[in-house]
Image (tube, helix red, strand yellow):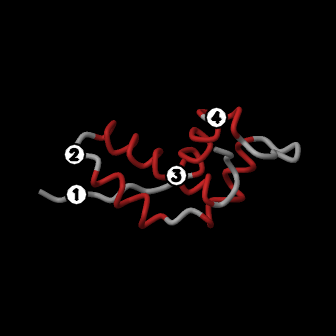
């Protein structure tokens, strides 16, 4: 069986921002879509892919695992406050 790696997209980041909208530190008037585009390069895609694959074989599980890892990274880089 061949596993395909999870590809991080701006939409994934935007979904995480929406999920934690009350925890976004400062939007500076930008939409979540704009913010996602700006931080895409700061997201460690290999780290997110590994988290996705470690979450299971089911696409929903992989997506949740990836979003959880994106959340952690957004906290680390100061976009989300926890």
SS state under label 3: helix
Element at label 1: loop
Alpha carbon separation for disc pair 1 and 3: 20 Å
Dot 4 or dot 3: first in sequence order is 4
Task: Say which residue appears at 24% left-offset and 46% top-offset.
Answer: 56
Mark 2 or mark 4: name the one nearer the start of the chain.
4
Q: CA distance from mark 2 to mark 3?
A: 19 Å
Evaluate if marks 4 and 3 touch, with contact meaning CB atoms under 8 Å apart. Answer: no
Q: Which residue is mark 3?
A: 70
Mark 4 residue element: helix
Residue pointed to by mark 4: 18
Say which of marks 1 and 3 sits in front. 3
**Residue labelled with disc 2:** 57
Spatial CA distance of label 4 from label 1 is 28 Å
Choose mark 4 or mark 1, whichever is in front: 4
Q: Is residue 19 above or below residue 13?
A: above
Relative placement, left or right, of 64 versus 43 is left
Q: Determine whether label 1 and label 3 are within 8 Å by CB.
A: no
Image quadrant where one finds the N terminus = bottom left
Badge 1 is on which residue?
3
The one of 2 and 44 positioned closer to us in this rendering: 44
Q: CA distance from mark 4 to mark 3?
A: 12 Å
Most extreme residue toward the left is 1
């Amino acid at each position: 069986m061949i596993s395909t790696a999870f590809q991080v997209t701006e939409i994934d980041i935007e979904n995480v921002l929406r999920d934690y909208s009350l925890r976004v530190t400062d939007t500076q008037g930008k939409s979540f879509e704009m913010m996602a585009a700006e931080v895409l390069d700061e997201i460690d895609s290999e780290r997110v892919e590994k988290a996705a694959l470690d979450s299971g074989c089911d696409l929903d599980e992989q997506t949740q695992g990836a979003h959880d890892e994106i959340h952690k990274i957004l906290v680390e880089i100061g976009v989300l406050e926890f």
